Image (cartoon, rainbow, N blue to C red):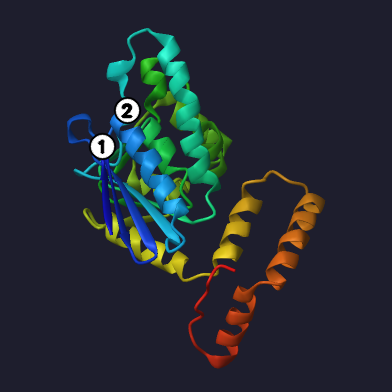
Amino acid sequence: MTGYFPGCTLEIDGPVAVIAMSDAKKRNALSHAVVSGLEAHVDAALGDPAVRAIVLTGANGVFCAGGDISGFDGETLPLRRRMPRLHRLCAKLAHSEKPTVAAVEGGAFGGGLSLALLADQIVAASDARFCASFAKIGLIPDLGLLATLPARVGIGRAKEIMMLADDVTAADALADGMIDEVTPPGQALDRAREIAADFAAMAPLALAYTKATIMRWPMTLQQELAWEAHGQGLLLASEDLQEGRAAFFEKRRAAFKGR
């Protein structure tokens, strides 16, 4: 199944949905067309019960060039109105019950880097580049980067990346923990599909609750134990647990249904 929306495409292949930003003229910058397409396709993927995992990528050899600065003409009101819309999209990606994988080819700059870091797993081609370029144009990092980047690389390294706005290579991003895997050029999307398929084979309720718990950090140990007890109690009554238990003893792959 495929779908098209100006600036963005959606392809659903079995349990995996691939959402690709596609605005070649603007290098997939977050224009109105791209953001509208992301909103429509993220909602479609999240609302499709057959979809178990989502891949976010960019077409035309680049992930995302960041904000569409052609619209930054000093009129602050339209930009301020745009932020809640982008924040709702970020929250959907970050808090999605379905695992997400970012596949980065080319560049992930500014808001593009922010979008990538909302994913649960990030795969990048070896020639990919990352840059928190906000300070170069007089802005602070947005779309969650002030939270997601320190969580991945630590506060000190995050300050360096965000305040100096230097390019980071895929190799350095991997060493920093900013991304999770590096592939040869042109192979990031294929690898992301494989990871998404692996996610899709896991018990959906268990993954959803794991994500929900992690998103509540930082927590004290007692808070985590209380949240864990609540979640485990729900999962112990699920059909997925019975299927997983049967598959374990029968030495076969489980066929989870998410209930």
Q: Which residue is mark 2?
A: 32
Using the image as rendered, state which of residue 197 and residue 147 is in the foreground. Answer: 197
Residue 69 location, quadrant? top left
Q: Residue furthest top?
A: 74
Direction from residue 170 to residue 145 in the image, left or right: right
- Nearer the N terminus, badge 1 or badge 2? 1
Quadrant of the image for the C terminus? bottom right
Residue at (46% x, 71% y) in the render: 201
Name the kind of residue labelled 2 in the image: His
Quadrant of the image for the N terminus? bottom left
Q: Which residue is mark 1?
A: 7
**Alpha carbon of mark 1 to alpha carbon of mark 2: how far?**
8 Å
Residue at (37% x, 7% y) in the render: 74
Element at badge 1? loop
Direction from residue 234 to residue 44 in the image, left or right: left
Residue at (46% x, 48% y) in the render: 119
Residue 243, above or below 143: below
Decide: few, some or many residues near mark 1? Use Cα within 10 Å; few <14, some 14-19, many ≥20.
many
Give the percent coordinates (x, y) of residue 68: 31, 24
Tell me if residue 245 can be seen: yes
Name the kind of residue labelled 1 in the image: Gly
Element at badge 2? helix
Using the image as rendered, state which of residue 244 and residue 143 is in the foreground. Answer: 244
Badges 1 and 2: C-beta atoms under 8 Å apart? yes
Give the percent coordinates (x, y) of residue 29: 29, 31
Decide: few, some or many residues near mark 2? Use Cα within 10 Å; few <14, some 14-19, many ≥20.
some
Give the percent coordinates (x, y) of residue 258: 55, 67
